[in-house]
């Protein structure tokens, strides 16, 4: 057997560079590169190996470990999980900085390979710098934090362990059902140790998505339910897009006259102006989608976990005879909410449903209602997002301006706070690539780093990041990375002077405004942050505007900028879109000295009576 004598780090890098994927008939490297922040736990081993592999596996320097992992995750999401990136750090704070990102990837079922350095396997220098010592277990390190938030976890303590570990990691990263973060904690001394690896280990391998076809009995059951439906409704989730199944959703909706609502990850599955598209569903949903979902007698959920925002905390589907079909590649998700399961790849499953439903069409009165509620919502959306001369515009008015300037090649990126709700309702998505939201983990700080990852994945797109001042303060350092790498972003910072979304939730639960808006927080010196000046110091073009008219003009300037362009605008922390939406279960205290809390508790008890535990 022919062998190559390599260090374990060199072997890992060579193996990763040999992995490929096929997209639209073209073979591309599976890994778009490696984000790296070096420290004593990875610079001598992986750092030296990556240096020699730059032509095949480029290395990108970031400014924050969590930020670079967010960018890598966004890169994978923008590539529909078909391409991905790796991230390496030293042991200690560099490693634990990635734990939040690992959790984000785990919740959203997105692939990222995390390679934190680890303590010495030989233990000679114990305790090494940054080592976390467990008094009862010397094998425990800081990297054990990754175990509950990784789909696959291994610790490499001998160089030959890579031969079995790396293929398992790749299997998880490329498997539609098990997809998520893989963590390989790499002992720093082992990185530098040599071993005679078989040459066959480094042979080129092309990975194709595994398309699970539906079970015949499950398929027949689903078809029978849909054929008997008088008020059918489809919920398109992220899985429909990851499986390249948007064309199949469209074909099924058109052939059978089915209204289609969308989760955050599924938004853009149908273009906003498609006759069957009724927009966002759930807590942040449109009145059109939620009215139809409440009446529906058969709900077909495609590629979604049906988390509480989608189901209005299990209160949305109010038809007492409603049946739920869960078409999902993951059996774990397909049985949720007492569903009739249809375990299958979304593209393959939808194609077989379409064949089985030939001749079926939703009743004319249901189709007429779909058209009526859709038309009413579009009027409400236009009113909410229209231009305004208000001194402090609403989030919806700001996103309306961004949406009007986005064009066919525009992509909006956002994550936590109040903006995702406004975007889910009101952003008029032209297609899947036009809308990129992280709302499974609702992670503040994802926005700018995520925008960088989207731009790296789709350099031809005009990427606009919408971020509140709260999230901006949590993580903004990848502005400098975007400038350094030449990946231009337009970043719109909406400054409502605090955590406006949680302030509204606090008050809706009867609480007093407290510790959310800056004016309600404990201050010795009043906060007055110049976001434009701050962004400019990192190399971006930056300006502050006042009102929607100035914002629209600034967005035009940003399109012609040669590098990342940041626009700051003051916004109203209280105003949100009144139309649409649904209840969300946020527990209100049973006992309080505040009358407002007691009143909110009474409303809460009433609302919980509408929850259906089996749905």
Image: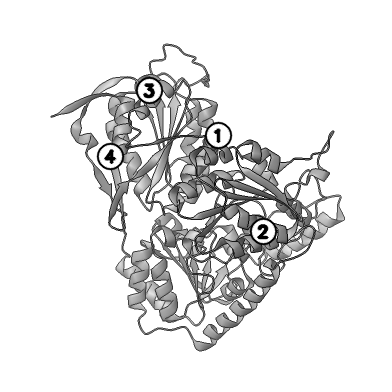
Q: Are marks 3 and 1 in contact (CB under 8 Å)?
A: no
The numbered mark, 1 or 4, whose residue comes first in the sequence reads 4
Please say whether residue 472 is visible from this viewpoint.
yes
* Position of residue 173 measured from the top left corner of the image (x, y, whole percent): 37, 45
* Position of residue 53 measured from the top left corner of the image (x, y, whole percent): 33, 32
Q: Are marks 2 and 1 in contact (CB under 8 Å)?
A: no
Disc 4 element = loop
For the C terminus, the quadrant is bottom right
Query: Distance between the Cα atoms at labels 3 and 1?
Result: 21 Å
Query: Distance between the Cα atoms at labels 1 and 4?
Result: 28 Å
The numbered mark, 4 or 3, whose residue comes first in the sequence reads 4
- Crowdedness near tag 3: few (<14), some (14–19) or many (≥20) residues, C-alpha within 10 Å: many
- Crowdedness near tag 2: few (<14), some (14–19) or many (≥20) residues, C-alpha within 10 Å: few
- Left or right of 199, for residue 451: right
State the image quarter where residue 580 is shown. Answer: bottom right
Disc 2 element = helix
- Left or right of 22, for residue 337: right
Q: What residue is pinned by disc 4?
A: 18
- Left or right of 524, for residue 150: left
The numbered mark, 2 or 4, whose residue comes first in the sequence reads 4
Q: How many marks?
A: 4
The numbered disc on residue 553 is 2
The numbered disc on residue 64 is 1
Q: Are marks 2 and 4 in contact (CB under 8 Å)?
A: no
């Amino acid at each position: 057997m022919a062998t190559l004598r390599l260090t374990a780090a060199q072997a890992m890098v060579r193996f990763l560079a040999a992995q490929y994927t096929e997209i639209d008939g073209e073979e591309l490297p599976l890994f778009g590169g490696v984000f790296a922040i070096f420290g004593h736990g990875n610079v001598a081993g992986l750092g030296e190996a990556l240096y020699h592999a730059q032509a095949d596996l480029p290395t990108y320097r970031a400014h924050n470990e969590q930020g670079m992992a967010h960018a890598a995750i966004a890169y994978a999401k923008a590539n529909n999980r078909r391409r991905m990136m790796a991230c390496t750090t030293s042991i200690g704070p560099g490693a634990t900085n990635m734990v939040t990102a690992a959790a984000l990837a785990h919740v959203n079922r997105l692939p990222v390979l995390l390679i934190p350095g680890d303590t010495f396997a030989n233990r000679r220098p114990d305790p090494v710098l940054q080592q976390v010592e467990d008094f009862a277990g010397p094998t425990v390190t800081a990297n054990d934090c990754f175990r509950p938030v990784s789909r696959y976890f291994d610790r490499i303590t001998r160089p030959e362990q890579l031969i079995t570990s790396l293929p398992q990691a790749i299997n998880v990263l490329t498997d539609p059902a098990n997809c998520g973060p893989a963590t390989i904690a790499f002992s720093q001394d082992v990185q530098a140790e040599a071993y005679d690896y078989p040459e066959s280990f480094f042979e080129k391998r092309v990975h194709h998505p595994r398309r699970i076809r539906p079970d015949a009995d499950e398929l027949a059951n689903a078809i029978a339910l849909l054929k008997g439906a008088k008020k059918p409704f489809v919920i398109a989730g992220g899985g429909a897009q990851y499986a390249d199944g948007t064309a199949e959703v469209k074909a099924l909706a058109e052939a059978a006259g089915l209204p289609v609502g969308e989760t955050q990850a599924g938004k853009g599955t149908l273009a906003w102006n498609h006759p069957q598209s009724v927009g966002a569903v759930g807590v942040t949903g449109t009145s059109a989608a939620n009215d139809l979902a409440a009446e529906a007698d058969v709900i077909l959920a495609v590629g979604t976990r049906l988390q509480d925002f989608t189901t209005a905390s299990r209160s949305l589907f109010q038809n007492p005879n409603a049946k739920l079909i869960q078409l999902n590649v993951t059996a774990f998700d397909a049985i949720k909410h007492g569903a009739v399961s249809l375990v299958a790849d979304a593209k393959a499953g939808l194609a077989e449903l379409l064949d089985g439903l030939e001749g079926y069409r939703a009743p004319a009165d249901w189709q007429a209602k779909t058209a009526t509620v859709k038309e009413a919502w579009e009027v409400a959306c236009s009113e909410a997002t229209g231009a305004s001369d208000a001194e402090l515009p609403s989030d919806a008015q700001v996103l309306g301006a961004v949406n009007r300037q986005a064009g066919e090649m525009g992509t909006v990126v956002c994550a936590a706070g109040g903006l995702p709700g406004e975007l889910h309702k009101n952003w008029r998505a032209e297609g899947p690539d036009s809308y990129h939201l992280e709302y499974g983990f609702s992670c503040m700080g994802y926005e700018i780093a995520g925008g960088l990852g989207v731009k790296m994945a789709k350099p031809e797109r005009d990427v606009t990041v919408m971020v509140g001042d709260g999230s901006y303060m949590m993580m903004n350092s990848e502005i400098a990375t975007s400038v350094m790498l030449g990946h231009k972003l337009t970043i719109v910072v909406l400054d409502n002077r605090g955590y406006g979304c949680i302030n509204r939730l606090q008050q809706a639960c009867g609480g007093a405004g407290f510790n959310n808006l800056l004016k309600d927080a404990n201050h010795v010196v009043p906060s007055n942050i110049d976001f434009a000046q701050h962004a400019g110091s990192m190399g971006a073009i930056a300006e502050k505007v006042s009102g929607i008219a100035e914002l629209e003009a600034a967005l035009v300037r940003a399109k012609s900028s040669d590098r990342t362009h940041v626009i700051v605008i003051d916004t109203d922390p209280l105003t949100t879109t009144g139309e649409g939406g649904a209840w969300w279960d946020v527990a209100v205290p049973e006992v309080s000295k505040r009358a407002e809390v007691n009143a909110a508790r009474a409303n809460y008890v009433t609302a919980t009576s509408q929850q259906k535990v089996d749905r």
